[in-house]
Image (cartoon, rainbow, N blue to C red):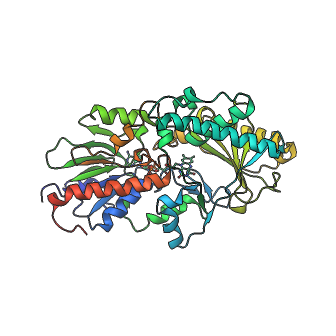
């Protein structure tokens, strides 16, 4: 039974529930990927320990129920491409109100809705920008998306570039790999969860035993038959480990891997980096945009400080200005500046009296969250092929999971979930012969 578990340091777990007796697999990070991995390992009948640095589960899928009195998803909100992963199905089965998102965005231009001709110009510009980037990536050219843009010019060109770049990929176009963009899967439908996407992910962790407030500082593979997992509450030894934390934390060595990563994995965690994307949420009564529930609004932009608006979230007065890329980085430094920006946008598009009705503001700042250091991944030009390297185990004992390891559904909770299931299968297969029976 070499390599099953050594519980030698359990005395260091502060007298609180420590991973019981035997643990084959340690899973680091209780975001969507870690939760999916733990559920899969448990379903296969293997002992596991799920360790989470913060005092809650969900990671970048988290719903704030307090600030506005209605659910506010501080991270992921859209259940993208529900046909490609099980989350909508699992939500419905658990009794959540999962419903289809409106499929057409609205378009506003300095206080008025776009005309039919302007809607068409807008749609055409987006289609041309997307096609140009996809064509380059599909031809296996991995270059900056900004290098292959069609010469559209004018406000429609910059509006389309804003939407396809910072608002979809959380990065400016010169930091977006054409190949990564082309490989991202597309299904033209999204769902919403009325109770909040974070609430749903938290619910899916309910059957699991999670060790909160347990930050892993190092994973040491130098022992022959075991992996030593060093945490803020002691050392845990196991047969295999799944690291389901964002690559930003590995690059900054908030979690160290010993011995040093090989060049392929090192290049991958550096290249598949997280961009910046944030919500500036607020209550805006009296529906000044005349929106139906959950409508997404784009504004024609001259390319500077552009944003979008998600209106009447869940049919309530909650609205959210969406910012990405450089603007998100800038506003993350100051909640006051984020609030002022939201008021400025509402005043421009709906008038000063509407802006004065903004009741409360809460802005996220994911690039400054210590256990995320960014919003979601998008490969830097020239590195898209390295996502695949991240799905490769090291020494059949270290497995990576997380949205950044999924080649087609990167940047999404669905991708994170599937990556957790994949890593769990890999890890259980790897420890099976070493730690005895009980594989279901
Ligand atoms: C503002 C925003 C909007 C988004 N919108 C959408 C959307 O609409 N739809 C969508 O599908 N996706 C969206 N995303 C992306 C989505 O949230 C992520 O892709 C997904 O949640 C990532 O899950 P994960 O498990 O890979 O990582 P995480 O959710 O980041 O989970 C990692 C976990 O590891 C923990 N951790 C970190 N370091 C340690 C350590 N040293 N020891 C122990 N634990 C540690 C963290 O606390 C965290 O709980 C959005 C993200 C943001 C930020």
- Say which residue appears at 54% left-offset and 62% top-offset: 199
- Say which residue appears at 84% left-offset and 42% top-offset: 111
Residue 301 or 179: which is nearer the viewer? Answer: 179
Residue 101 or 287: which is nearer the viewer? Answer: 101
Q: Position of residue 275 (x, y in %)?
A: 52, 37
Residue 203 or 108: which is nearer the viewer? Answer: 108
Instruction: Evaluate whether residue 252 shows in this view.
Output: no
Q: Is residue 249 left or right of residue 376?
A: left
Quadrant holding the N terminus = bottom left
191 shown above or below 266 = below
- Say which residue appears at 60% left-offset and 43% top-offset: 278
Q: Is residue 327 left or right of residue 92?
A: right
272 shown above or below 427 = above
Quadrant holding the C terminus = bottom left
- Say which residue appears at 47% left-offset and 43% top-offset: 183
Q: Position of residue 216 (x, y in %)?
A: 34, 46
Q: Position of residue 203 (x, y in %)?
A: 48, 65
Q: Position of residue 53 (x, y in %)?
A: 40, 49
Instruction: Evaluate whether residue 39 shows in this view.
Output: yes
| Count of marks overlaid on the render | 0
């Amino acid at each position: 039974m070499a390599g099953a578990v050594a519980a030698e340091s359990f005395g260091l777990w502060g007298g609180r529930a420590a991973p019981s007796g035997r643990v084959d697999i340690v899973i680091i990070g209780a975001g969507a990927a870690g939760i999916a991995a733990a559920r899969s390992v448990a379903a296969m009948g293997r002992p596991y320990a799920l360790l989470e640095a913060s005092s809650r589960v969900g990671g970048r899928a988290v719903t704030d129920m307090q600030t506005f009195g209605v659910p506010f998803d501080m991270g992921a909100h859209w259940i993208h491409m529900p046909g490609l992963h099980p989350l909508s199905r699992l939500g419905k089965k658990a009794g959540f109100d999962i419903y289809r998102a409106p499929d057409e965005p609205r378009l506003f231009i300095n206080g008025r809705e776009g005309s039919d001709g302007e809607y068409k110009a807008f749609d055409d510009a987006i289609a041309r920008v997307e096609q140009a980037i996809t064509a380059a990536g599909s031809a296996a050219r991995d270059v900056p998306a900004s290098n292959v843009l069609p010469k559209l010019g004018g406000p429609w060109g910059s509006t389309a570039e804003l939407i396809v770049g910072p608002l979809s990929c959380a990065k400016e176009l010169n930091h977006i790999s054409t190949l990564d963009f082309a490989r991202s899967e597309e299904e033209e439908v999204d769902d919403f969860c009325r109770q909040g996407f974070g609430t749903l992910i938290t619910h899916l962790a309910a059957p699991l035993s999670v060790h909160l407030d347990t930050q892993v500082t190092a994973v040491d593979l130098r022992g022959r038959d075991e992996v030593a997992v060093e945490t803020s509450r002691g050392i845990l030894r196991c047969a295999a480990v799944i690291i389901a934390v964002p690559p930003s934390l590995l690059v900054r060595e908030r979690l160290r891997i010993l011995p040093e990563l090989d060049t392929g994995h090192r290049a991958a965690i550096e290249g598949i980096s997280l961009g910046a994307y944030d919500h500036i949420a607020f209550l805006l009564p009296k529906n000044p945009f005349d929106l139906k529930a959950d409508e997404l609004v784009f504004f024609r932009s001259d390319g500077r400080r552009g944003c979008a608006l998600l209106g009447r979230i869940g049919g309530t007065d909650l609205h959210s200005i969406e910012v990405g890329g450089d603007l998100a980085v800038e506003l993350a430094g100051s909640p006051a500046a984020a609030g002022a920006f939201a008021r400025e946008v509402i005043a421009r598009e709906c008038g000063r009296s509407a802006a004065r009705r903004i009741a409360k503001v809460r802005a996220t700042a994911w690039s400054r969250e210590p256990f995320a250091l960014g919003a979601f991944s998008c490969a830097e030009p020239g590195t898209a092929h390295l996502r695949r390297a991240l799905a490769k185990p090291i020494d059949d004992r270290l497995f990576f999971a997380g949205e950044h390891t999924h080649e087609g559904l990167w940047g999404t909770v669905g991708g994170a979930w599937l990556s957790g299931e994949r890593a769990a299968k890999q890890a259980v297969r790897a420890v099976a012969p070493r730690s005895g029976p009980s594989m279901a």
